[in-house]
Amino acid sequence: MPAHELLTYALEGNIAWLGLNRPAKRNAISDALLAELDRGIARAQAEARAIVIHGHGPCFCAGLDLAEQRLRSAAEVFHLSRDWHALFGRIRHGRVPAIAALHGATVGGGLELAAACHIRVADASAFFALPEGTRGIYVGGGASVNVARLIGAARMADMMLTGRVIDAGLAERIGLVQYLVPAGEALMKAGELAAKVATMAPLTVLAILQALPRIQDMSESDGLFVESLTAALVQTGPEAVAMLTDFVEKRAKKVGEA
């Protein structure tokens, strides 16, 4: 792993591993790292079936590199925010499920990156915050939508107004992360989940990544209609037919079987 690499990339089987690699800066996201992450995500979506995003060093990501922000104009801040939105949108609405393996500081833009992923695994050392409010600024990487959808606007407002830090246990209880593991085990657990995700039928993955989040923004009637259309498309696909046949003919494991 060359010291100058801002982002490490490894393809192991059909799983792409992307590592934020500015440990001396707590993996703060600079313009250059954002560009590297954009390229890494594009590559992973072209050649992998699951993505794991993690951080090298003492934490996942301490957020935006504020050293680059102090002298920016309002227009520059606006366009940078839109760049973050575009990248994180490509993660959320891309073709490949992304799993965040979280440890240590996961704050500000780091939390926004984690929230853009589909599954979040935190180890016991992880902690979460949105310190922008206490620094006189406002979130710009999608937290108003993505974090608020996970934990609610009231909890997000509390974090921003008071600087509240949420530990890993509370993060799991309020739905900010889906998995909580002992310290040092987030990457291993993320890899286990990625291996399972990578075996999913492509049409099912498409439905989960593309239809499910959009249904949440629809009326009840429209959402149920789209669900029916999606079910019809997925269930009649060749992968689904083969997998259902395996289950009916008792070649597939039942729910709960190892």
Image: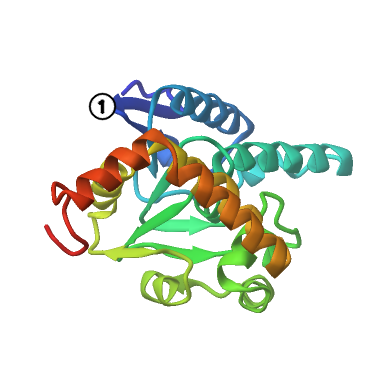
Rendered view: 244 above or below 215: above
Residue holding disc 1? 13
Rendered view: 154 above or below 139: below
Instruction: Give the structural element (helix, strand or loop) at label 1.
Output: loop
Give the side of residue 99 with respect to residue 233, left or right. Answer: left
Give the side of residue 196 with respect to residue 91, left or right. Answer: left
Task: Name the amino acid, label 1.
Answer: Gly
- Quarter occupied by the C terminus: bottom left
Q: Residue at x 70, y 67 (%)?
A: 221
Towards the viewer: 111 or 149: 149
Which scheme is used to colour this image of the protein?
rainbow
Residue 171 quadrant:
bottom left
Percent position of residue 113, x then y: 54, 48
Give the side of residue 44 with respect to residue 138, left or right. Answer: left
Percent position of residue 91, x then y: 55, 40
Rendered view: 204 above or below 227: above
Q: Residue at x 31, y 29 (%)?
A: 14
- Quarter occupied by the N terminus: top left
Percent position of residue 150, x then y: 56, 66
Percent position of residue 51, x then y: 40, 37
Towards the viewer: 64 or 140: 140
Residue 153 at least partly seen:
yes
Q: Residue at x 38, y 26 (%)?
A: 9
